[in-house]
Amino acid sequence: MPTAVRIFEYTWRYWKTLTIAFICLVFFTVIDLYVPDLVRQVIDCSIKGSAGVASGRTSCPLHVNPTELAAHTAVLIIVLTVLKGIFQFGQGYLGEFGAQGTAYDLRNEMYAHFQRLSFSWHDRAQTGQLMARATSDVEQLRFFTGRASLQLAQMACMTVGITIVLFLTNWKLALASLVMLPFLLRTVEHYSASVRPLFRNVQEELAQLAAIVQENLGGAKVVRAFAREPDEIAKFNRQDDRLQEQLIAAAEVQAYMNPLMDVIANLGTVVVLWFGGYLVVQGELTVGQLVAFNTYLLLLVRPARRLGFLISQCSRALAAGERIFEILDAPVEVKDAEGAKPLPQITGRVQFEHVGVSYYPGEPVLKDVTFEARAGQVVALLGATGSGKTSIINLIPRFYDVSAGRVLIDGYDVRDVQIKTLRGQIGMVLQDNTLFTGTIRDNIAFGVPHADDDEVLAVAKAARAHPFIMEFPEGYDTKVGERGVTLSGGQKQRISIARALLLDPRILILDDFTSAVDNETEALIREALKTLMRGRTTFVIAQRVSTVQSADQIIVLDHGQIVGRGTHQQLLETNEIYSEIYRLQLMDTSAKEALAREAVGSRAP
């Protein structure tokens, strides 16, 4: 019920449209209820006017010519049928309009909530699962609110109307027709309880299948590079088998329950014909009334046959609603504090005071990290994979919140200021470069959409991206493709740098920004950044010591703790971990140079 109520709350936003749709539904239901009574009058008048049966009991109006009545009734039924069609169109169109509006609101709210949810939530979520909930589950709700719910409403109106008409016609026969109703209601209740968890499982397995497809398509190159196509196909087939099992289980319940409900409904018709015939013989009921009575029952049996389908759709919609509301109810862990104020223009001084971070309870990622980066300084973070470098830079724009201590920018705790004004003064070039479908110009101006061509050109030149951009036939209007597939890793890196620089940030974060470029390109970028980093506080994460030698302050991390701090020369003399990293990288460089010389020598004549 809570899920159904919440779905209704979204649907109620379109109450005016749905109210008109319901009025149309009532009108064409009234027409459905009136037509059998017209048929009754024609039959009874025909019997009254027939030889040999004039003395029979009928409900034909006095002084009415049966032939004229039949002609007038035929015309009236045609008019009523046209009106019914108009009302059905209104009900169908307006009902679908309301349903599409409900789906529209849900999709928008889910997407907006995706943008607000914290990085920690996205770390645990599967993209394919989220896509399935935002598309397939919303579509299930749309279908139910647009068609199935109105059909259920029509069935309810028809049931109430026909019940009233039947009791007014003959209360004995009406009671007889309700003999099978308790059995039908019990069957419906059992069907609903049985099929709902099955459809919940169907939606879960379908979402898991979507996650596998999305993951496989996103990593298509890796799959082919390792010749894992057969294993991925087998993985997909196993999940598809699980989905099929759930669908077959649901189909089995439907295949059993739908005919059962048909049988119960038809048994009600049998009772009416048998007992109704007896009442006609006894003179308590006319033939026309019996025909009308049976017609009314058929009007109930027809939607009753769709009851199984409607119940399954209702169950699927409720299951889909539960999954959708799981996302909408997911808490936003990192959000503006109550009364948070805008962060004023900063100089870029960053302080970490006894900072600790744990993504999972009992598993600290950072432990008692304390340091200060003065405005305009270049601070390098160095350490092995998993030492906590990325965790530190994620705390500055408040992608995650600290578990202990605090992070200050110009003396402001990042948790006390508005996130938008905080991140608007921080530029980032992440290790995993994400470009969006569109042109190179669009991607560079992603953070400043109103930037003009001169500004885009300036930062592209500064990031040493301009030369390769102009090599493309369409220049800055070149389409980068999905995730930037038309560009090399180094090209994407330089576009990402240009994108960050266009923000003109006071704090610049470079997360292993030279990982995807060669030595020559790295030298060009580093040369450009010397000027661009002036006046900005810059945090640099790098694996190579050569990248961070000129930093004002190098922080060496190991297992989430600071184990060294100083300049390159100071750390070489005082820090064993740093000097060991430097020595190993020198050896590695020397070995590569020796191999290169050997390769050149082997090709010499």
Image (spheres, grey):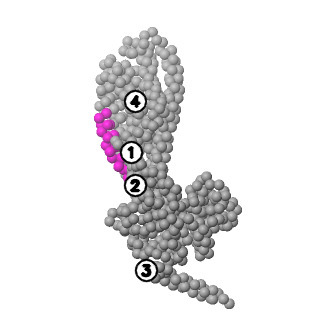
The residue type indicated by label 2 comes to: Glu
Left/right placement of residue 528 relative to residue 538 reads right
Residue ID at (43%, 51%):
340
What label sits on residue 333 in the rendered view? 2
Asked which secondary structure carries label 4, the reply is helix
Q: Earlier in the sequence, mark 2 or mark 4?
A: 4
The residue type indicated by label 4 comes to: Cys
Measuring from the top left, give residue 293's x and y in whole percent: 38, 25
Residue ID at (40%, 68%):
370
Quadrant where the C terminus sits is bottom right
What label sits on residue 318 in the rendered view? 1
What label sits on residue 157 in the rendered view? 4
| Tag 3 residue | 575
Q: Earlier in the sequence, mark 1 or mark 2?
A: 1
Kindly report which numbered mark, 2 or 4, lies closer to the viewer in this rendering. Answer: 2
Quadrant where the N terminus sits is top left
Per the model, the C-alpha gap separating discs 1 and 2 is 27 Å
Asked which secondary structure carries label 2, the reply is loop
Residue 34: tell me if it is visible: yes
